[in-house]
């Protein structure tokens, strides 16, 4: 695992955007094959999307040869609802960049056959050649995508029931009314994320500090599904200082030294 800590969420978001852009360019220099990018929603990735949009507008990066797969979507919420992850992605990223529409994949939480929808999604990822880089966030309870505590660490894309805690956290997007937050979602599994060639997980703010500590310094455990990143060869956690505030000083010093050594 690699760990990057920046003073503010803005700096950490910019770091992540530049890292993603570097990976897209690197692949384009090697091959004509598309770059396959896994994407999250939520408050956390917005700064990274903003920097990627800025870079696109400045001519520094193109997404023409990028295929995207989003992590998750609510079940039963109309796609046009402002809080659907379809709407979120259009508003915060896809409307502003040049990812071809046909290259965008988001789970359909209104599919007649949800299990088939999930199986087809896994199939589409495989057919795209697998995910090159999966970007994600961490829930306050340590979830990645909607893999709540006690999700199997070898889970694949499926229908899940959201915990009450997650629905309360997400009720801020539904006028503070937990009853408006859907009870179920479709989500890629922990193994779907770990199947990516590289995984970059963002965690910002003091509210994430306990989950960050548990996932980085604690045991590999289904109680904190983010801890599964420990079993990935190329996992990077990008934090601001508040999210890193519960890590031991030895952990922080070690990763700062690694970063300095890599920069030389
Ligand atoms: P947030 O959500 O980015 O809105 O904090 C992260 C998550 O729940 O995965």
Image (cartoon, helix red, strand yellow):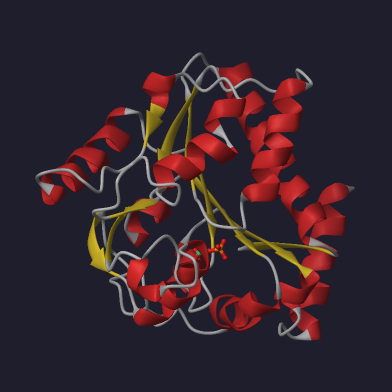
One can see residue 70 in this view: no
Count how many numbered circles sit on residues in the image.
0
Give the percent coordinates (x, y) of residue 166: 42, 74
Residue occupying image coordinates x 48% and y 59%: 232
Residue occupying image coordinates x 25% and y 40%: 121
Observer-nearest residue: 153 or 233? 153
Residue occupying image coordinates x 44% and y 69%: 228
Q: In which quarter of the image is the N terminus?
A: bottom right
Observer-nearest residue: 171 or 249? 171
Tell me if residue 203 comes above or below residue 14 in the rendering. Answer: below
Image position of 134 (left or right of 257)? left
Observer-nearest residue: 90 or 248? 90
Residue occupying image coordinates x 36% and y 80%: 164
Give the percent coordinates (x, y) of residue 4: 74, 60
One can see residue 245 in this view: yes
Image position of 170 (left or right of 236)? left
Tell me if residue 142 comes above or below residue 137 in the rendering. Answer: below
Tell me if residue 220 comes above or below residue 237 in the rendering. Answer: below
Q: Quadrant of residue 56?
A: top right
Tell me if residue 67 comes above or below residue 108 in the rendering. Answer: above
Image position of 98 (left or right of 103)? right
Give the percent coordinates (x, y) of residue 49: 64, 41
Give the percent coordinates (x, y) of residue 7: 85, 65
């Amino acid at each position: 695992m690699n760990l990057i800590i920046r003073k503010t969420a803005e700096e950490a978001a910019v770091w992540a955007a530049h890292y993603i852009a570097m990976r897209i360019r690197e692949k384009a220099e090697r091959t004509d094959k598309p770059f396959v990018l896994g994407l999250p929603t939520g408050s956390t990735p917005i700064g990274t999307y903003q920097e990627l949009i800025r870079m696109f507008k400045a001519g520094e990066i193109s997404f023409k040869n990028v295929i995207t797969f989003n992590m998750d979507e609510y079940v039963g919420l109309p796609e046009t609802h402002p809080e659907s992850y379809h709407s979120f992605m259009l508003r915060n990223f896809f409307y502003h960049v040049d990812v071809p529409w046909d290259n965008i994949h988001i789970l359909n939480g209104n599919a007649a056959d949800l299990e088939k929808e999930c199986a087809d999604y896994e199939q589409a990822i495989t057919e795209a050649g697998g995910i090159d880089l999966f970007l994600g966030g961490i829930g306050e309870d340590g979830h990645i995508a909607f893999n709540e505590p006690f999700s199997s660490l070898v889970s694949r894309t499926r229908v899940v029931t959201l915990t009450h805690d997650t629905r309360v956290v997400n009720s801020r997007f539904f006028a503070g009314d937990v009853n408006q937050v859907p009870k179920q979602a479709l989500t890629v599994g922990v193994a779907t994320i770990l199947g990516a060639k590289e995984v970059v997980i963002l965690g910002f703010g003091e509210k994430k500090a306990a989950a960050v500590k548990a996932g980085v310094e604690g045991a590999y455990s289904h109680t904190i599904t983010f801890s599964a990143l420990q079993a990935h060869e190329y996992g990077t956690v990008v934090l601001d200082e508040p999210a890193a505030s519960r890590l031991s000083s030895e952990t922080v010093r070690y990763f700062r030294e690694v970063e300095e050594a890599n920069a030389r």
